Amino acid sequence: MAERSIGVVTMDGPAGVGKSTLARRLASELGVAYLDTGAMYRTLGLRLGPAAADMEEERLRAKCRECRFSLETRDGTAKLCCNGEPVGPEIRTERAGRLASLVARLPALREELQRAQRELGEGCSLVAEGRDMGTKVFPSARHKFFLDARPEVRARRRYLELEARDELNGATFEDILRGIEERDAQDRGRAVDPLRPAVDAMIVDTSDLDLDGVLRVLLDAVRAGSGVLEEKAVCRRAVASVSLDALTLDRLRSDDGRAALDAAFGDGLVAAQAVAARRGVEASVDLAWSVEATSLVVDAAVEGPMDGTLALTAAQAAVASLAAFLPAGSVVCARLRDDDAPASS
């Protein structure tokens, strides 16, 4: 039975970040349906092929509507079906992934699939996994997550997955890494619905966390927002880090930099308190910073319910507040800490 008032949970992020596995497990834990929207793009990519890019808009829309997607219960589980038939393993190939990225750039096709996805999400609780769930398809979703990981980590996971299924077909780790980097460039740089986190999404870097650790964070956040989290006093820590050049690090050590850090900590605390207030909980949040090699690291410690969610929120918001001091294109990585070593400042 689904937990009460779950609604739609969105889970976005790049290829190879673990979205599919985590979305399935989260849906199972919550007792709701799982919607793999990437499978919908892969299905249309295989059925329409590269020729879709040259189709006239009306013909492309008509072809898309010929593929009617549904969630149907098979063997006690809700499965994605196309024209009444379950989507099969043929969509899990590297070719299917490349075709999915190709057709995902077509505005008419995206609009048709987004319409179909909204229809699937009407009137039911589900976990929707994809690349624009929180920004475009379900912008009013109560729970939004954006998962990320370093490209080499995602490539290694994908390599091991294909190796375990004996589906490498001669592909090397370098081949898969190159494919992921190309896919990232396409998805993040496309003009229509580029891959990016929703402004109110919780960003989780999975590079250094196992699946159980990430799942725990997601479950705590969903249950807290749905009023089903047990109130308990616990302490959890998170870090957000960003790589900087030597000049920027020197600027942050100056008086102006110290003032900017103080203001950033205030922004981080305000962001965490706003989330806590919205969820009706109270928690104690502490922030500190340090420099590790060439990275600025903001460390957040939280005691109270929703500890993982609030720690990540505070750390991410603090680093984001330093935008004026950060080089253009800086990437912030946030994760829960597995240790309880004291933070330095």
Image (spheres, rainbow, N blue to C red):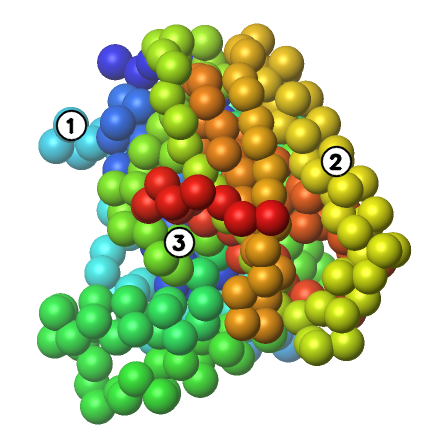
**Three-letter amino acid code at the position of disc 2:** Asp
Where 116 falls versus 58 (above or below)? above
Residue 96 percent across, percent down from the top left: 37, 70
The residue at the point 64 percent across, 76 percent down is: 54
- Label placed on residue 267: 2
Marks 2/3: CA distance?
24 Å
Q: What element does badge 1 sit on?
A: loop
N-term-proximal mark, 2 vs 3 = 3
Q: Residue furthest right?
A: 256
Where 320 falls versus 1 (above or below)? below
Marks 2/1: CA distance?
46 Å
**Three-letter amino acid code at the position of disc 1:** Gly
Q: Can residue 132 be seen in this view?
A: no
- Of 17 and 43, nearer the camera is 17
Foreground label between 2 and 1: 2
Q: In which quarter of the image is the N terminus?
A: top left
**Three-letter amino acid code at the position of disc 3:** Thr
Residue 66 percent across, percent down from the top left: 47, 51
Q: In which quarter of the image is residue 276?
A: top right
The residue at the point 75 percent across, 48 percent down is: 261
- Taking 133 as reference, is 3 left or right? left
Q: What element does badge 2 sit on?
A: helix
Give the residue at mark 3.
Answer: 206
Give the residue at mark 1.
Answer: 76
